[in-house]
Amino acid sequence: MDLSIIVPVYNEEESLARLVDELHGALRATGLEYEIVFIDDGSRDRSCAELVRMAETDSTIVVLELRRNFGQTAAMQAGFDHARGKTIVTLDADLQNDPADIPKLCKALDERGLDMVAGWRADRKDRFLDRRLPSMLANRLISWITGVKLHDYGCTLKAMRSDVAKELRLYGEMHRFIPAIANWIGVRVGEMKVNHRARQFGTSKYGIGRTIRVFLDLVTVRFLQGYLQRPMQIFGLGGLASFALGFAISAYLTYEKFVYGEALAARPLLLLGALLIVVGLQLMSLGLVADVLTRTYYESQHKPPYYMRRIIRHGGRASGEQPVRSSTHGAD
């Protein structure tokens, strides 16, 4: 299989037939052998039924039906785990990504010697105040914190080599941090301008609550990038600084007590010094515990981020009626 298209789906029944037509129109001319892997993430409309109907007559369509709504990150991980293509492309199901950009992204992988090419919606067709402006600020923040400079972390349209996708382990809202996570394991990442279209059906699934979760996951990603294998360096450094400052305050107060006879009982500085010493010891202890947990993390089995109900391929045949769990190779 040359190419796998990964498409997470949640309540997008109106756009699916047109999306498939556009994908075939963009890919058949390339001569590549491809599959379109739809992941139904617990849709409440007829999205899954529509996908099953199309899979009955279209041999390129694979449907992964998740047992409930696990979120876009888990759905994308399911797609990565079951994709068979040498190159893997991700895109949204809402028709805002243009399938005509897929051959260009795949071509850029080879021409530019990259392992991943991320789409950049330079001319984004969304409202400025509540969509584009927060996205611009978030992209700058993410680029600064992760050290991977991209214009558009929120664009789902990406192309990557299969070995890269198979190494990724995604949780929470980390699908938007795929370039940063991939860069951490040594992947060569680039970006390319892609077309963006206004939403035609349904409503956006994004809100302020999701923004907060993304920010919290950004903190996690930064920790994973720099300190996952050496947590003592961040906890221990903070603990050592706190302990040293508390010790210095305590030494100064001790000097005042014995040299000048100053009373210390009512001085807040004494409490601050004692608190800093205790906090410092706690942080260093936490660093030791984190080091032990890190070793356990690399040696243990990981809980899967999703459970599969069934897999539907050509002819509507279902397989994998038992829960299909993600593999345990690779760790981020």
Image (tube, helix red, strand yellow):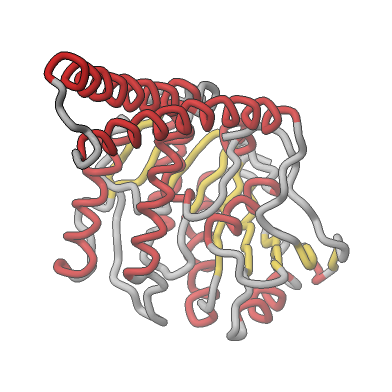
In the figure, is residue 120 to the left or right of 86?
Answer: left
Where's residue 165, x and y in %?
58, 38
Quadrant holding the C terminus = top right
Occupied quadrant, residue 315: bottom right
Give the farthest residue toward the left. Answer: 260
Residue 67 located left or right of residue 278: right
| Residue 60 picture location, percent across and down | 68, 58
Residue 207 or 238: which is nearer the viewer? 238
Task: Examine the rendered structure and indicate whether residue 67 appears above or below residue 179.
Answer: below
Using the rendered image of the protein, determine whether residue 104 is visible from the camera's viewpoint: no
- Residue 126 in percent (x, y) is at 23, 68
Look at 40% across and 28% down and name the residue there. Answer: 280
Q: Nearer the viewer, residue 277 or 226?
A: 277
Q: Which residue does the image show at 87% across and 66% down from the upper left?
A: 321
Quarter of the picture holding the N terminus: top right
Is residue 205 toward the left or the right of residue 169 in the image?
left
Name which residue lies at 36% across and 27% down.
238
Residue 135 seen in render: yes
The picture places residue 288, in percent across and down from the top left corner, at 57, 25
- Given residues 133 and 277, the one toward you in this image is 277
Q: Nearer the viewer, residue 253 or 300?
A: 253
Q: Which residue lies furthest to the front in this view?
A: 261
